[in-house]
Amino acid sequence: MKLRYLIAGLCLSAVALSAGAETPIVIKFSHVVASDTPKGKAADYFKKLAEERTQGRVKIEVYPNSQLYKDKEELEALQLGSVQMLAPSLAKFGPLGVKEFELFDLPYIFDNYTDLHKVTDGPVGKQLMSKLESKGIKGLAYWDNGFKVMTDNKPLRVPADFRGHKMRIQSSKVLDAQFRALGAIPQVMAFSEVYQALQTGVVDGTENTPSNIYTQRMNEVQKYLTLSDHGYIGYAVIVNKKFWDGLPADIRDTLEGAMHDATQYANDIAKKENDDAMASIKAAGKTEIITLTPAQKDEWKKAMARVHLQQESRIGKELIGEVYQTTGKRL
């Protein structure tokens, strides 16, 4: 009799162990920047929250610095299900066929984070995310990086200084038009290749946020940095829609809560991270920092204002008008 109870107990223990050893759902989260950037830190924070709150039912594997996929590869990998989560720059959606996202690339479209968040947190932001679903993509959140500066091996103070310079850009028709308006020659290039291209002179300069410039050591191979704040870099955290829809409802709800809190964290640290990076670039002493006078900044704005008009047919005149109305913006 005792033996029978012992065997039954062992069987029940085995079932309990089996149930407790449920294989976790793995989410591969790939991105192209360093771990110590705003996006890198936010991705790691989301991993922490998601794993804690699902009590191990979900495992987030974060792959920074293009370890899995480069700029041009990652969206296709997401659509194919080779990776489940990305946080690409908003400029990446134009080449995917959702060109409305390129409104974020328009020069001087946002003056500050307050105006920006009126758009990303409001109806325009939701409208844009919904356009990704036909591509098999579910948009979860907008994460800030910050406002862009210009770097080059020659000083850039007025629009004429750009003439003939080869400037690296992300693949965006708007960014292409922006640099052509300044008389520069835009060259599309993967983020992971920019340092070497600057070092060898394949391109003369680039635009990016201070945190991206500093963590990729671009300041070490650029003599000048202009505090232009001419454009914005942000990210959309996205997932493979089929994968997301197939998750248990309670898991999905928990991950949405973790993403909400990670987004708050990402946007809170973005400005500080860029300010700290700027201070580090100054302290390194290899790059001269140029602060534009109000008159010089007005020249930049005038030179690039036509880009808004040029891109109305691509982005949508009505959509650009909605952004103007939301922010009170007029160039």
Image (cartoon, helix red, strand yellow):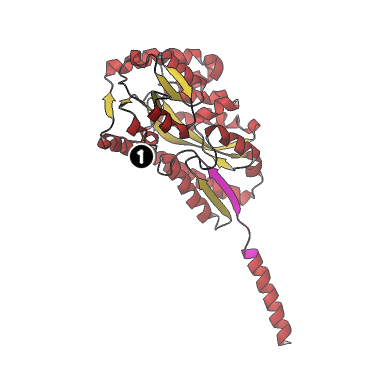
In-front residue for pair 288/175: 288
Q: Residue at x 68, y 78 (%)?
A: 9
In-front residue for pair 326/28: 28
In-front residue for pair 199/102: 199
In-front residue for pair 253/26: 26
Left or right: 57 as drawn, with respect to 297? right
Count the marks.
Answer: 1
Report if residue 109 is visible in the image: no
What amino acid does circle 1 point to?
Glu
Image x and y of residue 137, in percent = 61, 36
Magenta region: 19-32
Callout 1 crowding tier (Cα within 10 Å): few <14, some 14–19, many ≥20: many
Q: Per the image, is 151 magenta?
A: no
Image x and y of residue 260, in percent = 49, 43
Relative to 328, residue 282 above or below: below
Image x and y of residue 41, in percent = 43, 45
Q: Secondary structure at mark 1?
A: helix
Q: Quadrant of the C terminus?
A: top left
Q: Residue at x 54, y 50 (%)?
A: 60
